[in-house]
């Protein structure tokens, strides 16, 4: 099976993501406005890896082309990564990070598996539905940035627990 590539980019999504993560000058992160679970968790996970990243929320059909930027859970442009092969952008990011350090798979592998199913529109019967978290955050008045902040708190806490246990 061929790796999924962005239609406007010759590189596989995993390479686009890895090269961006490794580039110290790559500091801009885009995701779509009115974040869903995949967008919120993906942006939050990236912020754990690159805490100084500048996060911007744009319309979902925005094309991101700047080499210092990446667009998570978006489709347009050579800098977009959607995680089509995995099922979610979050799944792609976890898989990419896990290839570097197993702590990422231990911490978020099961979460990625669930989100891969949920984001692909397939039925899943899980105790925690990330979709419900985002809806709940919206219900109490959080905007896109607030949803990503809350997602980051959850991810940061989970990572801390896993690192303590290892």
Image (tube, rainbow, N blue to C red):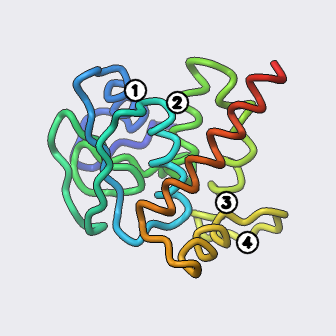
Task: Give the CA distance from mark 1 to mark 4.
Answer: 30 Å
Question: Which label number is shown at residue 18?
Answer: 1
Q: Which residue is mark 3?
A: 117
Q: Which residue is mark 2?
A: 96
* SS of the residue under disc 1: helix
Looking at the picture, does residue 73 appear above or below residue 166? below
Q: Which residue is mark 4?
A: 123
Q: Is the C-beta separation of discs 4 and 3 under 8 Å?
A: yes
Nearer the camera: disc 2 or disc 4: 2
Q: Which residue does the image show at 62% across and 18% down from the upper left?
A: 101
Q: Say whether disc 1 or disc 3 marks the residue closer to the N-terminus.
A: 1
Task: Give the CA distance from mark 2 to mark 4.
Answer: 25 Å
Q: Say whether disc 3 or disc 2 marks the residue closer to the N-terminus.
A: 2
Circle 3 residues within 10 Å: few <14, some 14–19, many ≥20? some
Q: Residue 128, image x and y in percent?
A: 78, 62
* SS of the residue under disc 4: loop
Question: Which label number is shown at residue 159?
Answer: none
Q: Which residue does the image show at 52% across and 30% down from the upper left?
A: 96
Nearer the camera: disc 1 or disc 4: 1
Q: Is the C-beta separation of discs 1 and 2 under 8 Å?
A: yes
Task: Give the CA distance from mark 1 to mark 3.
Answer: 23 Å
Circle 4 residues within 10 Å: few <14, some 14–19, many ≥20? few
Q: Residue 25, image x and y in percent?
A: 22, 24
Q: Say whether disc 1 or disc 2 marks the residue closer to the N-terminus.
A: 1
Q: Say whether disc 2 or disc 4 marks the residue closer to the N-terminus.
A: 2
């Amino acid at each position: 099976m061929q790796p999924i590539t962005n239609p406007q980019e010759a590189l596989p999504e995993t390479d686009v993501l890895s090269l961006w993560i490794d580039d110290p000058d790559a500091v801009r992160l885009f995701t779509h406005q009115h974040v869903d679970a995949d967008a919120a968790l993906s942006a939050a996970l990236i912020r754990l890896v690159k805490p100084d990243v500048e996060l911007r929320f744009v319309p979902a059909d925005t094309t991101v082309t700047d080499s210092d930027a990446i667009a998570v859970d978006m489709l347009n442009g050579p800098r977009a990564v959607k995680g089509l092969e995995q099922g979610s952008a979050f799944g792609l990011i976890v898989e990419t990070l896990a290839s570097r350090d197993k702590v990422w798979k231990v911490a978020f592998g099961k979460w990625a598996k669930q989100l891969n199913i949920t984001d692909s529109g397939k039925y899943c019967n899980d105790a925690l539905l990330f979709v419900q978290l985002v809806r709940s955050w919206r219900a109490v008045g959080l905007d896109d940035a607030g949803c990503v902040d809350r997602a980051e708190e959850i991810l940061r806490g989970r990572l801390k627990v896993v690192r303590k246990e290892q």
